[in-house]
Image (tube, helix red, strand yellow):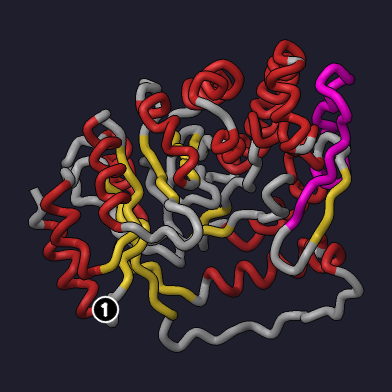
Amino acid sequence: MKHRDLSAKPDYDASAARYEAFFARDGSERPPVCIRFPKDGYVWPELPRPQYSSHKQRWCDVKTRAAHDAAYVMSVEYYADSMPIVWPNLGPEIFTAFCGCGYGFTESTTWSVPCVKSPTDPTPRVDFDNHYFKLLEEYTDELLKYGRGNFIVGLSDFHPGGDHVAALLDPENLAVALIEEPDAVLAMMDAANEDYIKVYRHFADKLIAADMPLTSWLPLISDGYYYIPSCDFSCMVSNDMFKKFFLPAIEMECNFMEHTIYHLDGPNALRHLDTLLAIDSLDALQWVPGAGRDNFAESLAIWKRAQDAGKGVQVDAHVSQLGEIMSALSPKGVWFSSIGGIQSREHADKVIAEIEKWR
C-alpha cells in the first residue's frame, strides 16, 4: 500500500497493510477491525441548511451535501482499522440514469424508470454528457476538494450487469425475456458490460489521480481497481440461468479489478454460492442474510464455506460471538467490518488484543 498522510487517520499506513494482508489472505497481520467513536471535542462548522422544494432538489444539491459529508466524516474517530471514507451517493441505479432513463427520488433512496420495452429494442447506452453523469462528476470533485490530505473519497454505487439490465427493462419484463428472447438479453448484457468498464475507469482514474485509494459503499481499500460485484436479480433465477446470463459479467468484473468482494444478498441468492466461490479472481464474500433473518449459525456456516474455497469474508458480529468465530474460522482473510457491543476505547483495546492472539 502507498503511504498516505490523512488528518482523519494518522495511522493510515498500519491499517492499510492489514487490508492488503486481508486480500492476500496471508496472515501476516491481524484481521482488520473497524471500530468508530465520536471525536472528543469536535466543533461542527457553521454550514448552510437550505430549504428544498423537493427530494430531488435536495439530492442534487451536491455542493451542500459535500460540505455536510466532509463535516460528518471529520467528526468521527477512526479507531483500529476503520477508515474515513465518503462516497458520492446519488442512489443505487445512477448507472442506469446515465443511459437516459427517468430517475425518481424519495427521502432516503432513488429509483430509475424503465425505458426499454423489449430487449430487441436498441439498448440505451451511457451518455457522458448526461445530466446525472455530470452531477456525479461534480459531487466527486467537490468531495475531493475537502478530502485531499484529510479523508478518502470513494466510488459511487453503480449496480451494473444484471441489475442494470433489470432496471432498463423492469425486473418482470427481464424475467420473461430470459425465456422468450435469450439472445437479445445476452446482447444487452454485453452492451452493459462495455459501458460499465468505461464508467468505472472514468471515476476510478479520477480518484487515483487525486492520490486516493479506491473504495466505495463497502469500505475496503485498494491501491488498484477495487469494487463490489453483485447481482441482486439473481434471487429470481435458477443457477443454470445465472450461469448463462449473469455469471460472465461477474467474472469479467472480477478479472478486470485487482480486488473484489461479492455482495450476496438474501437466502434466495444462496443457490449461486458455490458458483461464485469457484471464480478464481474473486477475493472475498459479503453475505447479507436479508431483512429479519439475523441467523448467526447460518452466517458462520457460509463464512466457513467461503474460507474453505479460499475466499476472504466480511464479518459483522457482536463481541459475544467472537469466541465462536475464532473457533470456526481462520484469521486469514477475515475483515471485521463492525463489532457490536463495544462500550469504550478500553473495551475495544481488550477485544483487539484477543483478536491478535487468534491463530
Whether residue 129 appears in magenta in the rendering, the answer is yes
Secondary-structure class at tag 1: helix
- Image point (53%, 26%), residue name: 238
**In the drawing, does residue 138 fall left or right of residue 329?**
right
The residue under the point 84% across, 50% down is 103
Position of residue 82 relative to residue 308, above or below, is below
Q: Percent x, y for residue 8?
A: 45, 67
Decide: is 146 above or below 167. below
Q: Position of residue 185 (x, y in %)?
A: 72, 19
Q: Is residue 191 at all visible to an observer of this figure?
A: no
**Overall secondary structure of the magenta section:** loop
Residue, far right:
53
Percent x, y for residue 89? Answer: 67, 55
- Residue 37 quadrant: bottom left
Query: In terms of depth relative to the viewer, which is nearer, 339 or 188?
Result: 188
Q: Amino acid at mark 1?
A: Arg
| In the depicted structure, whether residue 119 falls above or below residue 285 | above
Q: Label 1: how many residues lie within 10 Å, few (<14), some (14-19) or many (20+)? A: some
> Is residue 215 visible from the viewing direction of this image?
yes
Q: How many marks?
A: 1
Q: Position of residue 221 (x, y in %)?
A: 43, 46
Q: Which residue is mark 1?
A: 345
Seen at 66% across and 39% down, the residue is 203
* Residue 86 left/right relative to 272: right
63 relative to 344 in the view: left or right? right
Answer whether residue 7 is magenta in the image. no
Give 195 or 47, whichever is nearer the viewer.
195
**Magenta part of the chain:** 110-134
Which quadrant holds residue 312? top left
